[in-house]
Image (tube, rainbow, N blue to C red):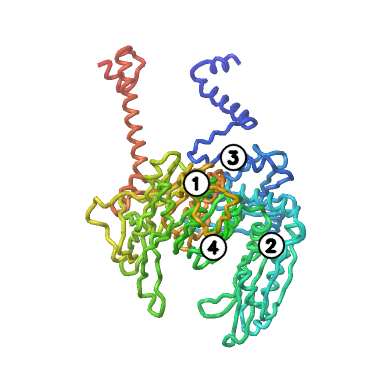
Amino acid sequence: MRKLLDYLKSSRGDVVLLAVFLLLLNMVAYRAFVRLDLTAPRSYSLSKASVQTVRTLEEPLSVKVFFSANLPAPYNSVEQYVRDLLTEYKGKANRNFSYEFYDMSKPDNERIARNYRLNQMQIREVKNNEVGFKQVWMGMAFTYADAVEVLDGISSVEGLEYKITTTIGTMIATTNTLAGLRGTVSLTLYKTDAMRDLGIMGFDEAETEIRRAYTLVNAKNQDKITFAVEEPPADENVPLAQQYGIQAINWDGGARHGIFGLVLSYGGSFRTLPVRLSRDIFGRNFIAGLDTLEDDLADSLKSLVAKSVEIGYVRGHGEWDANDDENGAGALTDLVKDRYSFKLLDLRTDDITPNLASIIINGPKRAFTEEELYKIDQYLLRGGNVMLFIDPVDEVLPAGENAYYQQPSYHPLDIGLERILDKYGISFGKNYVLDERCYQEQNQMFGAMPVYFIPELQRQNMSQKSVISRNLGYVYFMQNSSIDVSGAEAADGERVTVLAKSSPRSWLMSGAFHTNPSFLRVPADKSQLKSENLAVLVEGRFKSAFDAKPADGRQDDGTISVSDHLSESIQSGKIFAVGSSKLTRPQLLVDDGQPVAIFVRNAVDYLNGEADLCAMRTKGLSLNTLRARTGKAVSAAKFINTYGLVLLVAIVGLLAWHRRNARRKAVRMRYNPHDSREVGADAKEAKE
């Protein structure tokens, strides 16, 4: 025993004592631990919105996690991130929150996962120098009251906290709303049975598939939905189609008429589901939308009954149709429909009501009247928020038989918004911003062809101070004008944030517009190249662009005089401005998980007081992208990133080793040069 104590007291026992200390420290930390999140976007810490959501649970919320064991990289890190994230939720939640991980090697647990309508996904696995594929489970199921929601195919940690928190929040809102519904929600299939003779693929099976989806969704939502099939009289087909935005169909040269569409309605509101007649590449007609009907029905129900925030969508000036998925801004509507709904505003007759936290002006082609501009001005001064997607010119696509071989024509736009924007210090250029750092189109004849009017914005081009654009990279803008905010920067009470700007290798196209990549060249005069603002945010208090309310033509009887004109802001407002409406079109807004969609959705959330959602959505999305574009530069960067760090560590290690030996030698030579116990080259040299 004494020998052991003597050993531990000596310097040789330090390693053993250190190991014992670390073991005891880990045992203590296992029971009472402290976590530090040192990542820049706070990827492993819950946002305020998440904490608030789980702290206020009124009923038990259960999270069931179905992940296969021994997942290959990088999917194994996803499972660990889910564990860490749910631990954080549990630590911040009240007693109504619980979670459980299921062992997916047991058949019973696989059956449970399938009952929640989770599916196995196929991932690629590299093993023994061979590439193979593996079927795995990577999903989660949430139950709250009688509601059930799932997140399936969780193959990445990007935006996962946002998905979990919004799923829980939507379940709470929907459950509370359904519990308080007066009456039921109606699901109606409008169809003409005579269309059965047209040989439409899937027509006979459509009603069966719709009933199946209805039964599943209704069972998860307290049986609050009723289903009916109606065949309207022929003279009601067109009015119904116009009312609900469903398909009115005619055949036999227009002699016969029919209707087909699926509508979910409650009270005075409705949602039209995307079940419709379509045509494949072979010209055959079929019923589309049945394969995703259950999810579409569940999403539409949430949007319909939950208390979503209304956003004013201005129309009447040629703006993009908010309900047109193919040629309008339907992609924007789909992007925000989980929390927001659009209220169409015709400013010639409608006022902007105070309950609207924001309004959107998206691609107007015709001029606003003085009265309409005044309504926008006064709304902003009362603390309203305005989103502007303004095109510099009207791009008219060619029509006719030879349209494919013709270029679009471009016509200057004078929409009159300059009347008020100039007063706020915001000026849209009548130009296109072209950027050498741009999208590369793969051409069969010419190879990679730069499309200069589609700038590619990386992290350094996006503001890292704003939650709207923080951590985003590879955001594409298209046919965007420059935006001058020097007036706003000089104004008292206004704060300007340039959210997105082009690279320093940018120039402007004005006057003669065209978008043929083959005829676009980088200017020889390098003085023309400079960075341009593409998207800006102006916040604060504004001065009115009007000295008084415009005359409305009404006669004044002289008995009562009323004045409610505001000359300056009474509350802080916000203006989000982009020099193109392409960001709301299907060309760019293709997926709610892509940076362009995240940027637009963040802007909508921010203007509607949901800044915490922006921070959650962009966690883990920060990209340190490669700035080099030429072949030699890319090869050099690849070599440095692959081998440079290893070589640098080796060189530093050798230098440290050499310095340490030199110092040791110097100490020996000074204090003990003739010690006979020294061995090796140093001792031999000292004796000589």
Residue 254: x, y in percent? 58, 85
Which residue was labeled with disc 2? Answer: 268
Q: Nearer the viewer, residue 195 or 448?
A: 195
Q: Residue at x 41, y 41 (%)?
A: 491
Marks 1/3: CA–CA distance: 23 Å
Marks 4/1: CA–CA distance: 22 Å
Which residue was labeled with disc 3? Answer: 48
Marks 4/2: CA–CA distance: 19 Å
Q: Residue at x 62, y 85 (%)?
A: 256
Please tell me which of labels 3 and 2 falls first in the chain: 3
Please tell me which of labels 4 and 2 falls first in the chain: 2
Characterize the local packing of mark 1: few (<14), some (14-19) or many (20 or more) Cα atoms within 10 angstroms: many
Q: Amino acid at mark 2?
A: Gly
Marks 3/2: CA–CA distance: 35 Å
Label 4 vs label 1, nearer the camera: 1
Q: Amino acid at mark 1?
A: Lys
Secondary element under disc 3, as helix, strand or loop, is: helix
Characterize the local packing of mark 4: few (<14), some (14-19) or many (20 or more) Cα atoms within 10 angstroms: many
Marks 4/3: CA–CA distance: 32 Å
Q: Nearer the viewer, residue 5 or 587?
A: 587
Q: Amino acid at mark 3?
A: Lys
Please tell me which of labels 4 and 1 falls first in the chain: 4
Label 1 vs label 3, nearer the camera: 1
The answer to whether marks 4 and 3 mark residues whose Cβ atoms lie closer than 8 Å is: no
Marks 1/2: CA–CA distance: 31 Å
Please tell me which of labels 4 and 3 falls first in the chain: 3
- Count of numbered circles on the image: 4
Quadrant of the rendered image containing residue 643: top left
Label 3 vs label 2, nearer the camera: 2
Q: Amino acid at mark 4?
A: Ala
* Depicted 57 relative to depicted 315: above or below: above
Residue 73 visible in the picture: no
